Image: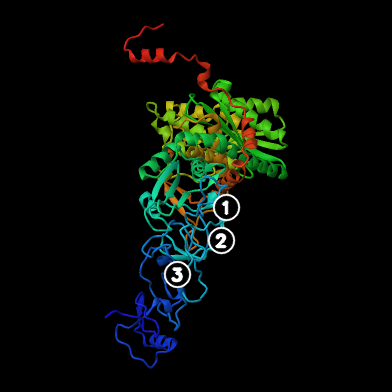
Amino acid sequence: MVRRCSVAGCNSTAGLHSFPADLKIRRQWLHALGLEDREFPPRAGVCKLHFTRDCFSNAMEVEMGFSTQLALKRDAVPYAAPPARTPPPQRRLAPTMTREIGCQTEPVSSMYAGVQVNMKPMRRSKATQSRVANGTCDTGTPMEPFTECPGATSTPVKRKRCEVSTDDSSYHQDGSESSMNCTRVSNEVLHHKVTKYIVYEDKLLELFRRCPVCTRSVVVSQTIIGTLLRVKQHCAYCEYSSDWSSQPMVNNIPAGNLQLCAAVLFTGSSFCQISKFLDAFKIQGISESCFNKHQAKLLIPTINWQWKIDQDDAIENAIANGAVTLGGDMRADSPGHSAKYGSYTMMDLKANRVIDIQLVQSNEVGNHQQMEMEGFERSLSLLEERGVVVQSLVTDRHTGVQKFMREQKKDISHFFDLWHMGKGLGKKMDVLSKGKGLQDVGLWRKSVVNHLYWSATTSTTGEEIVAKWSSVANHIQNIHSHENTLFPSCLHEPLVGDQTRHWLKPSTAACEKFTAILLSPRLLKDLHKISPEYHTSGIECFHSLILKFSPKNTVFSFKEMLCRLQLAAMHYNENAGRSQASTADGDLRYSIVFPKFKHGEFMVRALKSNPTTGYIDKLMELLFHHVVEEPQPYLDFSGQMAVPEKLCAQFIRPDKEEAVSRHGSRIFKIT
């Protein structure tokens, strides 16, 4: 026997739902339907027409074609009178068994057209993802989306693009359910902030294989432009056609292509590595020529402009704080004297902020030493022209910088960085300890460098620093009384037992050579100028950070190198003041590391909180809101930069065919 609806006057056989087993809810059903006095067979049920849309937990899935069976909520209660039904049209809009077009569409309650715009932004969409005008809305009234839609025709109703009004729920990766905010997408949509998903090609094309009007198979063609996928549909039966794009256009540039290029450069990544990653994952990417084009025309001008804004802010803050203490040092892009680029960094040591970067190419000056001097002079001159009052300057012991400051900048106090002096002293001791019979010198390395730090940090004058430091020459010989009145004797207690050291015997080769290093005239002279308060450790941290944005094993053009230095400076300035990380209980976090320079000894390091990348958001905002719309002012600003000739420009370029022929032969005449 065929099951039918148990409500009087309704003989529907589709979508029957059995009476609940819970006696309390069963009584509510019987009371709502007026059937308290009737008895029903065990298989009796009520059809879906007697329930509102709110009564079903998966109504959305059924409407979009992802499910065929409606599921009642536990507390759902039917009503007696079914809704009035209109005669079905000649052609169904979309049967229940057919999936709707567009995996990124909105629920039936929203009337809208393609959210994903087509290739020509000024044209209206052909409603690839649209629905007819009589789509039902959730109003609490009897439900009708499971019957034929009245008034449906074979011609889709055109809507204005960006008419989006949703109140849908979606599931995240972690399985949690969250309601999407009701939004209205406008022409001011922030394309770079829209979340993207990885969609497999076969699953995506499934959504386009049937006509959304007559549900028959359609002709589908696709076009790929970098990361953009364009799908065209054409139905030979109802003449339906559509043109759908997977991403919007930004000034005739696919937004995904531009944002991928920006993400690679703004994060300091390598296009080669990202390209290999995308290829391994089989994700459609962009070509290297596309990346280089966007980098030259849009991305580098964006970085240069944003760095100018940040640098202006840093200079204004420095001027507002009065006289500043600067720290300077150079970094080469490769070790030794084969460096192509030398970047000189000037940092405001009080604010711990990079205030200027100067990039010098080797053919502009001549050698490594001159590159540092050129960068230093450019940076100091620029800051003084901008109104920065320099009170003191901390650098390494570069002889050219010393002479320049001594002769031309007498009003600026010049100090030497303590870390650089300790590093240089340690290297000399390492070299000396490798000699025959001089191994005992290496045992004093750590103690002597620590003594240098102690002498500099506990003294008030240069003479006192020299007096304390000179005492180490007697100390290594187990002599602890000294002739200098400023420091007549060692401050430590008598050393006995395990506290005794490998004392050097007087007049031995090890003692004489070691003493010559410790009491060299230049070292004693420079000790008077050790920086009493500020050091350039922040610059060394910044130079380490540059390796993440500009690895030394990768070759960059002049502008590429400069913009990556500017990106590193933005990252450092944003994260220089990070606090120390803590556990859930509030305890500060530390880690134990074994640096290479410690030669097997451990080191305790305080862990910092996670770095932020707000500067990337600023760059994206500037790129998508200003540079793409009006790139010429930014190109003009970037074009004002003086770019030196390539290194190969100074050489005579041979004829290519002749060079290839000579290369291919084993024996050739040398001219």
Which of pointers 2 and 3 indicates the residue nearer the eye? 3
Residue pointed to by mark 3: 145
Mark 3 is on which residue type? Pro
Q: Along the horizontal axis of the image, is 137 left or right of 29?
A: right
Quarter residue 434 falls in: top left
How far apart are the two marked residues, 2 and 3, measured between alpha carbons? 24 Å
Q: Secondary structure at mark 2?
A: loop
Query: For mark 2, does the 10 Å Cα neighbourhood hold few (<14), some (14 to 19), or many (20 or more) residues?
Result: few
Q: In the rendered image, which quarter is residue 443 located in?
A: top left
Q: Is residue 181 left or right of residue 636?
A: left
Q: Amino acid at mark 1?
A: Val
As drawn, the residue found furthest toward the left would be 1
Quadrant for the C terminus, please. Answer: top left
- Closest to the observer, 494 or 307: 307
Q: Secondary structure at mark 1?
A: loop
Disc 2 marks which residue? 183
Q: Helix, strand, or loop for circle 3?
A: loop
Q: Nearer the viewer, residue 8 or 592?
A: 8
Number of other residues with Cα within 10 Å of mark 3, as a class: few under 14, some 14 to 19, many 20 or more: some
- The disc labelled 2 sits on which kind of residue? Thr
Name the residue beneath numbered marker 1. Answer: 189
From what the image shows, is residue 96 above or below residue 634?
A: below
The Cα atoms of the two marked residues, 1 and 3, are separated by: 31 Å
* For discs 1 and 3, the disc positioned in front in the rendered view: 3
Residue 203: % across, % down = 37, 53
Q: Position of residue 356 (x, y in %)?
A: 62, 36
**Residue farthest to the front, as pictured:** 90
Q: Is residue 41 visible?
A: yes
> Where is residue 527 shown, x and y percent of the image?
59, 33
Which of pointers 1 and 2 lies earlier in the amino acid sequence? 2
Task: Name the residue located 47 percent from the left edge and 68 percent from the top edge.
Answer: 150
